[in-house]
Amino acid sequence: MKLKHYDAIIIGAGQAGVPLAKKLAKAGKKVALIEKRWVGGTCVNDGCTPTKTWVASAKAAWVAANSAHLGVKIKTYKVDFSLIKKRKDDIVLNARKGIEKGLTATQGLDLLHGEAVFTGHKTISVKLNGLGVKHIKGDWIFINTGTETFIPHIEGLSNINYLTSTSILELDKVPEHLLVLGGNYIGLEFAQMFRRFGSKVTVIERSQRLLSKEDEDISLEMQKILRLENIDIQTGSEIIKFKQKVGGKIAATVKNAEVEKKVKCSDVLLAVGRVPRTQSLGLEKTGVKVDEKGYVTVNAKLETNVPGIYALGDVNGGGAFTHIAYNDYTIVYRNLIEGTKYTTKDRPLPYCMFTDPQLGRIGISEADAKKQALDVIIARLPMSRVARAAEVGDTRGFMKAVVDAKTKKILGAAVLGQEGGEIMSVLQMAMEGNITYDRIRYCVFAHPLYSESLNNLFMTIPE
């Protein structure tokens, strides 16, 4: 068996793999980038890019239906789902083509379309898409295979045509009644957008509240917002059985406490979690360890237990976000090529849920502070007291911050409101620069911006 040698092999052309491959090649390394599906990873193909185009369309529909209080009365409007899908497909395809063009134009970089499996220590066989098998070996290997939808064990699930966050993007018509399993980030974004497209929507969540990892006041406010849009939210509930009915309908048996009831729907979306794509990699052949959930274990420099093999992005369990995957790339590249000593220790983990309004989060929550017995002060401001929100006519939600009572430093923030992610980013910059809340209280912001109300947020803390 003839092995072709590379300085670096990257498995997965996601948001860490693509820039890393290009930068290593430009640094003079011979690089192989392996991708079994499409370049760009989940973000470009079935995550951030396509879903945010649909979020924008859903928001336009909501504005059309909810503008009378602004003096603009729209009697009728039509959701053209075929056009919505075409717009999404065009944007995704344009992004994908751009990425692939950039990769193929990079000297020293071989883009291999196929499935990678380890066959020995740092050796990989690539089953090329319809073109045989290629055997390669690398000095450095980077695993960037991401995650996929977790499929729960529910009676009858295999007998229905359920949807995942990937397959739902290929629908060519709006579901009559969408049943969403999971009341967290992915499930709630799809639930709201399809309700706005015209679907009847039911959300089933096993926990006693939505967004169980967020503070309770955030969860309750989000539940209130979604119920105002006539989304049926059933918490403390689980589906124990599915049955395909004559005529295409699906019957779900929902259990809440000891009470069972039937819910009939047209479509089912699974959004109860994700699992790492490591099962078919043959990691045992090269000695790479995974944890009990299948995530590749890494140290603070993102290196596995096997020297020279790294895991980047969602597959290492360090945060399933595009920006974290990209930051993983910058850490390993700078360390290996520039000789730096960057680590993931104390790295900020900002994120934004793109419901409407958005939920932007950074740092610790109020619940985290209580668990750690920290001496903190909670600043809280309803969006009804934000001038810009009142002027725009959307005062849903609130902003809150967790600050250290002694140092006055901001430890965390949650902003549920219009431009929540952008406001959160302002607070993140303050945290990065050790700017204390009392300075923000009297900082001069342009009027009337949403961020200007950070003045008022911190004025809720007594001087």
Image: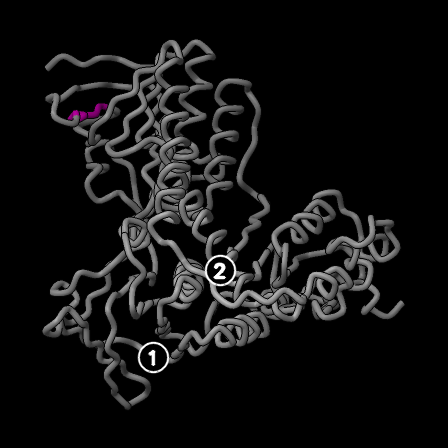
Tell me, yes or no, if residue 428 can be seen here.
yes
Q: Amino acid at mark 2?
A: Ala
Q: Which residue is depicted at the point 35% across and 43% down?
A: 86
* Front residue of this view, candidates 456 and 227: 227
Q: Amino acid at mark 1?
A: Ser
Q: Which residue is depicted at the point 23% across and 83% down?
A: 262
Query: Does residue 134 appear to the left or right of 453 in the view shown?
Result: left
From the viewer's perspective, is the residue at label 2 or at label 1 nearer? 2
Question: Which span of residues is magenta-colored?
Answer: 123-128
Tell me, yes or no, if residue 304 can be seen here.
no
Q: Which residue is depicted at the point 44% across and 39% down?
A: 299
Q: Residue furthest bottom?
A: 259
Decide: few, some or many residues near mark 2? Use Cα within 10 Å; few <14, some 14-19, many ≥20.
some
Decide whether residue 356 is among the magenta residues: no
Residue under pointer 2: 61
- Which x, y percent locates residue 205? 37, 73
Q: Secondary structure at mark 2?
A: helix
From this view, report whether residue 292 is shown above or below residue 93: below
